[in-house]
Image: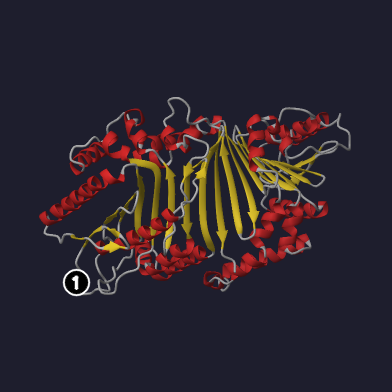
Amino acid sequence: MFYKCERHKNRRYAGFLSAVLSVLFAVQSPVRAIPSAAECIPKNAVISVEIARPKALLEFFTGEKVTKALTALPAYKNLTSTPKFSELQGIIGFVEATLQADWRTGIAKLTGGGVTFAVCPDDIVVLIVDAEDEQMLGRIHEFFLDIARGNGYGGEVESGKDVTAWTFDGKSAHTIIGKRFVFASSLDGLKAVLELRDKSGSENLTSKPGYQSARRSAGADAAAIVFADMTLLKYVPEISSLLQKSTGNPLAALAFAGIIEAVQNSSRLGFGLHTAEDKLILDASVDGNVGGAGSSAAFALPKKSDQGVMPNLSVPRRLAAMSLYRDLHEFYAAKDELFPERTSGLIFFENMMGIFFSGRDLTNEVLAETGPEIRLVAAEQQYDASIGRPAVELPAFAAVFRLRNPESFKAVAEEAWQKAIGLVNFTRGQQAMPGLIIDRPTQGETKFTVAYFSSADAENKAQLAQRFNFRPSIAMPGDYLVLSSTDGLARDLVDALNRETKSPPASLAGTHSEVEIDSSQLASILEANRMTLVRGDMVKKGKTQAESEAGIDMLIALTKLTKGLKVSIGTDGRLTNARIELGLNLQ
């Protein structure tokens, strides 16, 4: 259809293309209404990305607040003194002179009408850009065309009645129709796009039910919309393998329950990106049915419409928190169907649980005692100066379960925990290693149990061994069971649960998973372990100390630019929805 003829190419081939082009566009009227970009994308597109509001994203990512925050970073200031930065400035200046506008204004005018990208079968990629300034689009096109000519790809232009086609590399093809730039990775791809432009009412991406559903779920105010045809995409070997690995791993199956099944059963995946003040919000949805008869994810789905996860627990120095709705009794009762192959890890786990719980049936006498509300917490540690500080500082972590029959089960849980500590001490004793000492302190009205390593014989209490990050504890305030890696976090959780008991929060209806990450605490932990991270980076990647320090410092600085991340996942009818919120710290 279209092809740029290089000066040394066969002239007969160019003449043939010219004749084909003339026939294709002989019946076209010089003026026609241009359909939307999505209507020009073939129906068989596997993935499409539409930036519906480019200016909103441009303002968010290059606005005054973000620019001020990024340019204040030490890494940015170091970058400005490098030769490559000077070269980049020169290129930007040259492009701005070509556009006759600063680069932000230029991008806004070149993309203001929207940007649409699609991946189709046969390795065809399509890009459609709707500009606001037709003359500026022409100037930037000539700029890149001159570069292509300088690289030996410039040549004659083949024209139809109202369309002209070029190529930048002799393989791809593109054209400009008014304010619209249309690019395809092959001549056939461009032909398919232009045929849809010419055939009003033809089936295209917008006539696909999955696309329509994804577009509705994204919301009318979405700055960007992503659609993926899962009927094709989930059969990509890498994706299929990932889904299968997740279902074969008990912990992954427990953590991602409902999500994996929804993706496996879905016909489409959709994303809608929204901008708010100092926040990016990504809404995702799949239409795979979950929770029906025989569903492997039934244990993770609330049984009633008003049920869902409990709000995440808040404790001092919290790094991360996760709240899950998981019925462990149902999960383990279905283990034979979920995990037909009895792995050595699963067998070992069952044997240990049998010892700890004195032969009680793990499914019906242990896990059945826990409710479906499971909450996990990680927090930065606050070390006692009288004990010492480890050389490598790890966060504390804990799991909180609600008990169905706390009066009868608390003693069972305490005995099992102490047996586990005894086994650890026995094993360490065989290796002539120091063991754990058990104590029974109180927090408020709650007596709990802690096991700890003594630092009395430590030569340098400022550089203790890594084991001093752990002071395993068990606490059972009210109806709850707390298993914590440290007594400090156990105390904080006892206080948090006591406050919650006095003023019970409502569950998050329809939500079965929620995760929150607090960036300030993450940055604090990274800073506390900076030199350890630097040394590890030097060893693994063979970098100099200066290079590793620059990389770790950049990671810490970028972490400080964010306020936190929150992910919520739930079901609404046939849809499984996820909301991801990323807050930015731009003050």
Q: Which residue is mark 1?
A: 458
Left-right relation of 111 to 495 = right
- For residue 488, above or below residue 251: below
Q: Quadrant of residue 283?
A: top right
Report the number of numbered marks: 1
Q: Where residue 144 sits in the image (x, y, percent)?
A: 71, 53
Tell me if 157 is positioned left or right of 271 in this view.
right
Q: Amino acid at mark 1?
A: Ala
Residue that protrudes farthest toward the top in the picture: 293
Q: Residues within 10 Å of mark 1 (few under 14, many from 20)?
A: few
Q: Which percent across, then down, holds residue 516?
A: 48, 54
Can you see residue 299? Answer: yes
Give the position of the C terminus as an image quadrant. Answer: bottom right
Residue with the most extreme right position: 30
Q: Nearer the viewer, residue 447 or 486?
A: 447
Residue located at (46% from left, 48% from top): 310
Q: Quadrant of residue 104?
A: bottom right
User: Is 523 displayed left or right of 355 in the figure?
Assistant: right
Residue beneath the point at 14% across and 60% down: 433
Q: Nearer the viewer, residue 211 or 550?
A: 211
Does the rendering let one see residue 10? Answer: no
